[in-house]
Amino acid sequence: MRALRWHGKKDIRCDNHVPDPSIEDPRDAIVKVSSCAICGSDLHLYDGFMPGMTHGDIMGHEFMGEVMEVGSANKKLKVGDRVVVPFTISCGECDQCQRGNFSVCERSNRNAKLADKMFGHTTAGLFGYTQLTGGYDGGQAEFVRVPFADVGPVVVPDGMTDEQALFLGDIFPTGWQAAVQCDIQRTDTVVIWGAGPVGQFTIRSAILLGAEQVVCIDNVPERLSMARAGGAITINFDEESVIERLNELTKGKGPEKCIDAVGMESHAARSIDAMYDRVKQAAMMETGRPHVLREMMYVCRPGGTLSIPGVYGGLLDKLPFGAAMNKSLTFRMGQTHVQRWADDLLKRIQDGQIDPSFVITHTASLEDGPELYKTFRDKHDGCVKVVLKP
Amino acid sequence: MQRKSNQEYRNNHAARKAARSLGWLSIGMGVAELLMPRALASTLGLPGSVGLLRLYGLREIATGVGLLMTDKPAPWIYARLGGDALDLATLGVAAQRGYEPVNTSMALGAVAAVTAADFACARGLRQEKHPVTVFDYGDRSGFPQGAEKMRGRAATGQGSSQDAPQVSGMDAANREAPNRP
């Protein structure tokens, strides 16, 4: 089969003779991928900021398609079903899954010992996202093996297009969880750093959840125009002071809810702390550039909540924790418990409350994938979200 | 979904920010040249050039103020490049005289580095003359019924899911209990 594989930093290729997957466990399913997407967190792998990738790993954790084969113990799916697959692999039976904490499933990470060493305790296995999370083949391929396929995959109803359903596997629930974790009240100002795909869904989730004022910060005009279309007030940090504008919008009190939809590769470029982070990151003394986290801790209203859907991989430096502690801030974060939200969000799409296809700006074949990684990373050609059709 | 696009001229924010920084640097250098020309002249190996250094100081302050006050920084950056050429020529003369060879060489190196920064800034500002394709996603709300109509839909239970959150305190903490059968 054809698949996009990681061959090193900034080296992703569309390989033609990759072995087809097969059923390895009776609960498995094999899915023929009809649509897959490049996620912002794939860029951390592309840029070499996440440890644990090995030569030849298949990329991709946002995908959907048709079930081609089902293991003997899988009673949920049948051949021919159209499914969208959550990026977190969850067994559905362990203590964490029973509590709804699907992204920290205790059983699905095949390399749990490695994750134990890195994080203290293992997290769930993820598709196409380093050996640390199980080393599972990803979905930017013609076919993919889905472990525990009787738990995760969501059957897509007839009449719903791939473009509407695909993002139920990751970025829509991620934006939703980021907003829900904030416990949004009707009087709240919710500020979202980053107008990328997750930021866009977070804006729309915050609107659906009733925030009085939703603000989005970025410096890419196209992304800001999409954010405004979704109901957000926008701040272009190249053109105005984030802190001054937020004070103006909140009468000097600061926003109640702050959401980091940027993660470890903050591009707030020309501030002193950002330059410091670049130097430390280049010297391998820090794994992320947490400019956004610092800014959120500083601007958030006392008693407020910081929600962090943006991905971080390791060690961060110079966080103003004194401000966070003394202001009684609450931190909520984590990989998305996709299975917790997907059914509800599917209903909202069916209900006509939201149409997730708005975010797609580029659709192409799998062969064009490597080039589109670059386009997406560099935010060229107005690129917000890439969908590939294997 | 079709994409709307148009051609637009855009400010190069990085170059404009660099131009402001160079403006401040200019003022700093100018003040130093104006207030302590004798010390600078002897350090740089330019004895007898006190008046010249004062003039250079005035020039630096003028370009610095110009850069900080203008909306069109390009001409002022070109003025700085002209000044850089003068500085390099003056230091070249000092190097030939050889009064303070080490200090003069270091100053030449520093001016060369600043000249490179001026060049980079000028190049960045030149890009503003070329139109770029800008995509307008103002029609992509994602809400088939419009954003304002959807505000609070999940909070008020008007949608299909009646159990969506609008709760606080311990109820909020407990809200995320598993909802799967």
Image: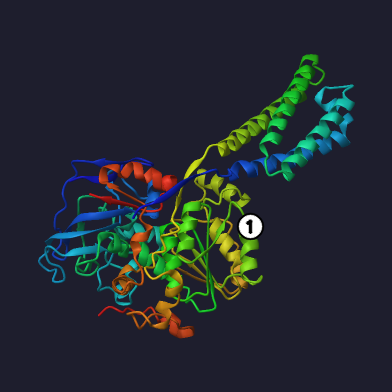
Left or right: residue A71 versus residue A263 is left
Numbered disc 1: what chain? Answer: A
Q: Residue at x 13, y 64 (%)?
A: A26
Q: Position of residue A353 (x, y in %)?
A: 36, 72
Q: In which quarter of the image is residue A99?
A: bottom left
Q: Residue at x 38, y 41 (%)?
A: A10
Q: How crowded is mark 1: few (under 14 residues within 10 Å), some or many (20 or more)?
A: few
Task: Give the colour scheme of this rendering.
Answer: rainbow
Left or right: residue A218 versus residue B47 is left
Q: Residue at x 63, y 57 (%)?
A: A241
Left or right: residue A188 versus residue A93 is right
Of helix, strand and loop, which one carries label 1?
A: loop
Left or right: residue A73 versus residue A386 is left
Q: Can residue A121 be seen in this view?
A: no
On screen, residue B18 above or below A261 = above
| Residue that extends furthest to the top in the rendered view of this protein | B96
Q: Position of residue A38 (x, y in %)?
A: 34, 52
Under mark 1, the amino acid is Ser
Q: Quadrant of residue A147?
A: bottom left
Q: Mark 1 points at which residue?
A: A241
Q: Between residues A142 and B40, which one lies in front from this camera angle? A: A142
Q: Quadrant of residue A298?
A: bottom right
Q: Is residue B7 visible?
A: yes
Q: Between residues B130 and A332, which one lies in front from this camera angle? A: B130
On screen, residue A265 above or below A94 = above
Q: Which residue is drawn at 19% across and 44% down?
A: A18
| Residue that extends furthest to the left in the rendered view of this protein | A72
Q: How many dots with numbers?
A: 1
Q: Between residues A12 and B143, which one lies in front from this camera angle? A: B143
